[in-house]
Amino acid sequence: MLTPGQAHDVQGFAPLFRMIEGRIEAFLADRGYDADAIRQEIAAAGVEAVIPAKANRRTPAPHDRAKYRWRNLVERLFNKLKNWRRVATRYDKTRESYLASSRWPQ
């Protein structure tokens, strides 16, 4: 699902979640996904919501902190993919600029 760049991730949540809901046991997300509508849809699918509550929530929903730590691995994976994008697309056209920006030994 493609949304405008200024749109919040919540707008694309429902169609994407329906694509994976039968294949997951827990949904790990950041505080941006702490909305009652999202939590209800996750619960209706029988999936555990591992989403920390926003600071301004009146009745904070508990979450599994041990499972939430796994989200860090996903964030690091995306960071590596973004870093490797430079290699795949070759923004650096000259050998010198490419080697200067890469971590590989010359």
Image (tube, rainbow, N blue to C red):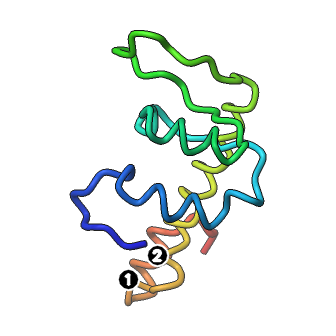
The disc placed on residue 86 is: 2
Q: Which of the pair 82/12 is nearer the observer?
A: 12
Q: Are marks 2 and 1 in contact (CB under 8 Å)?
A: yes
Identity of the residue drawn at 46% across and 11% down: 59
Q: Which mark is residue 91?
A: 1
Front-most of residues 57 and 94: 57
Is residue 81 rendered to the left or right of residue 94?
A: right
The residue tagged with tag 1: helix, strand or loop? loop
Q: Label 2 sits on what residue type?
A: Arg
Q: Quadrant of the N terminus?
A: bottom left
What SS does tag 2 mark?
A: helix
Q: Position of residue 70 (x, y in %)?
A: 71, 39
Dot 2 or dot 1: first in sequence order is 2
> Outermost residue, left direction?
6
Q: Quadrant of residue 97?
A: bottom left
User: Which residue is at the front of the view, 26 or 95?
Assistant: 26
Instruction: Tell me which residue sits at (30%, 51%) in the image.
Output: 8
* Residue positioned 58% across, 48% down in the render: 75
Quarter location, residue 44: top right
